[in-house]
Image: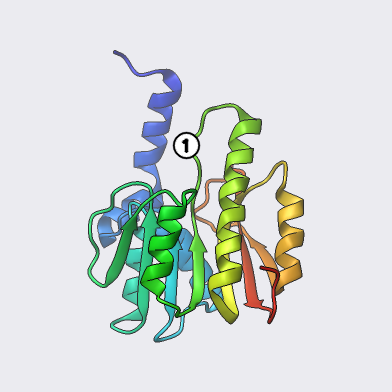
Amino acid sequence: MPRSKSSARWLKEHFDDAYVKRAQAEGMRSRAAFKLEELLERDRLLKPGMIVVDLGAAPGGWSQLVRRKLDEGGRVIALDILPMQGIGGVEFIEGDFREDAALEALQARLNGTKADLVLCDMAPNISGIETADQARAMHLAELALDFARNWLKPGGSFLVKLFQGAGFDDYLRGLRADFARVTLRKPKASRARSREVYALASRLCEGASR
């Protein structure tokens, strides 16, 4: 079956993409690693010995980058609904974060120890129905925020991918109620036409709403 014009255009854009080429050259699993790299460096989010939780981790670009930057110390715990090829030093849980079983497995892995940084690059499968896709994306972001409120150390940080649309402003208000500082970031590796932005919420307040 011949590819549609839009599919062929996407493939050409993908393989011509400078970040795709860089990821291949540097042995990174995805171009998304360079979004995170810019944010980590700009905001100095990583420190030796940190515990980092990566939600929506597959294919593993973010976990791979964090593991490299933490060297031998700290922990990286990754979760995704999709299988992910193992990464040395990364603890991976395959499960659907919308279901209790996945959350319980993640909590068991933490075993009462709270995280310093929660990363969330989760996104729903796109149906093409914008209102439904936005609602599903915001639901995942809400679940990630609930997790961060409960499992971040006081003073910890939360980085979450959001799509601008319905529910976006209310979500930011919720972040600002629980964190001392909230900033929006659009990394250079994010495609210009994408509605995605990253909200960085720093310094979880003591007694943040649970």
In the rendered image, which quarter contains the C terminus? bottom right
Residue 102 drawn at (x, y percent): 41, 55
SS assignment at label 1: loop
Q: Is 63 rendered above or below residue 9?
A: below
Q: Is residue 65 left or right of residue 152?
A: left
Q: Residue at x 61, y 51 (%)?
A: 162
User: Tag count in the figure?
Assistant: 1
Q: Is residue 156 left or right of residue 106?
A: right
In the rendered image, which quarter contains the N terminus? top left
Q: Residue at x 45, y 78 (%)?
A: 112
Q: Is residue 209 left or right of residue 65?
A: right
Q: Is residue 112 visible?
A: yes
Q: Which is more toward the observer, 87 or 115?
A: 115
Q: Is residue 42 left or right of residue 105?
A: right
Residue 8 drawn at (x, y percent): 38, 25
Q: Is 5 rendered above or below residue 57?
A: above
Q: Residue at x 40, y 60 (%)?
A: 33
Q: Which residue is mark 1?
A: 125
Residue kind at label 1, given as amino acid type: Asn
Q: Residue at x 61, y 66 (%)?
A: 200
Residue 62 drawn at (x, y percent): 39, 62
Q: Which is more toward the observer, 163 or 34?
A: 163
Q: Which is more toward the observer, 196 or 142?
A: 142
Residue 142 in which image quadrant: bottom right
Q: Is residue 197 visible?
A: no
